[in-house]
Image (cartoon, rainbow, N blue to C red):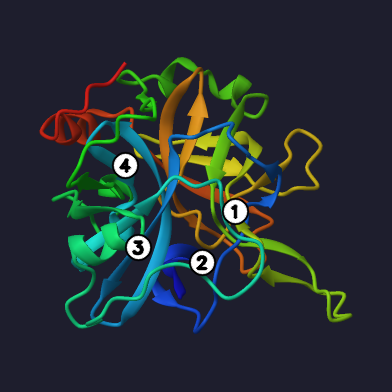
Amino acid sequence: MKVRFGRLAGVLAMAFGLATLPALTASAITGGQPDGEGHPNVGLIAFYDSTGRFRCSASLVSPTVVLTAAHCTLGTVGKTAVTFKSVIALQPPSPLPVAANPATGYTQAELEKAGYLSGTAHTHPQYSDFTDMANWNDVGVIVLDRPVTNITPAKVAPSKHLDAIPQSKLNKTLFTAVGYGTEVRKGEDGNRKPQPMSYPLLRRVAEEPGQKLTPQILQVNGNEHDNRGTGGTCFGDSGGPSFHGGYVVTVTSYGYTLNCRYLGGLQRVDIPVVQNWLAGFGVKAG
């Protein structure tokens, strides 16, 4: 399975969408620690498009709606697989389902037979596909075919929640990132250079200090060696939430380096252009 990877227009920023690294699977947030059952409403999604099978992270925000990034929903064929298991696999092979017909993607029947939830992907209609910082809108949802009744949904932040944090205090404010992305660490083969490690594939959590806030993006410092935080997001964390004050305030959108130890870009979900769209799916903020 591949993880999505994108290019931020204007800079050499590696985002968690668009182009792909062949056969690169994902396992854990860089740094941080295993989440266990700390965030049971954060899940993993898997899906097909015309180029292959991919996966991202996501969060349950109503019994029937899963919130993720637009680049994890754009161009999806067939159904999207959803699971809220904390540990997916400790070692290969991957247990994630394979569609009987990759050209048409998953069906509800085959996903449910494999023990997964199924749903239909929707992309924000004003998603700019990484081309317009003023209209980034990297938000998507999966509308589930059956409601989730045994997990309490996460709450989406009230409108302009992040605007209440002064810039002078932003770098002292921690945001809790959760996802199933690649952990970058020294290889077990003797290679001392930190590299993406495929397993274990599990949900992890890290604290990231704020760095910059724009009308669309919260930029954070995801370096695990920064003594203000504990790590950051990496490949496969796309679409996963960041929490502040008990609310989902962002979804992971992009990053700047291949080793995931620098700044991360998170799409705000506390802004009207996102919240008005989510309301159409019955998702209420606050």
Viewer-side label of 2, 1:
1
Label 4: which secondary element: strand
Viewer-side label of 3, 1:
3
Most foreground residue, 87 or 124 = 87
Q: Position of residue 2 (x, y in %)?
A: 45, 75
User: Which residue is label 4 attached to?
Assistant: 67
User: Which corner quadrant of the image does residue 207 belong to?
Assistant: top right
The first of marks 2 and 1 along the sequence is 2
- How far apart are the alpha carbons under marks 3 and 1? 18 Å
- How far apart are the alpha carbons under marks 2 and 1? 22 Å
User: Which residue is label 2 attached to?
Assistant: 14
User: Which residue is label 3 attached to?
Assistant: 114
Numbered badge on residue 202: 1
| Amino acid type indicated by mark 4 | Leu
Q: Position of residue 114 (x, y in %)?
A: 35, 63
Relative height, residue 86 to residue 50 (above, below): above
Say few, some or many: other residues with alpha carbon within 10 Å of mark 4 (under 14 / 14 to 19 / 20 or more). Answer: many
User: Which corner quadrant of the image does residue 193 belong to?
Assistant: bottom right
Label 2: which secondary element: strand
| Amino acid type indicated by mark 3 | Ala
Query: Decide: marks 2, 4 in contact (CB < 8 A)?
Result: no
- How far apart are the alpha carbons under marks 2 and 4? 22 Å
Most foreground residue, 235 or 225 = 235
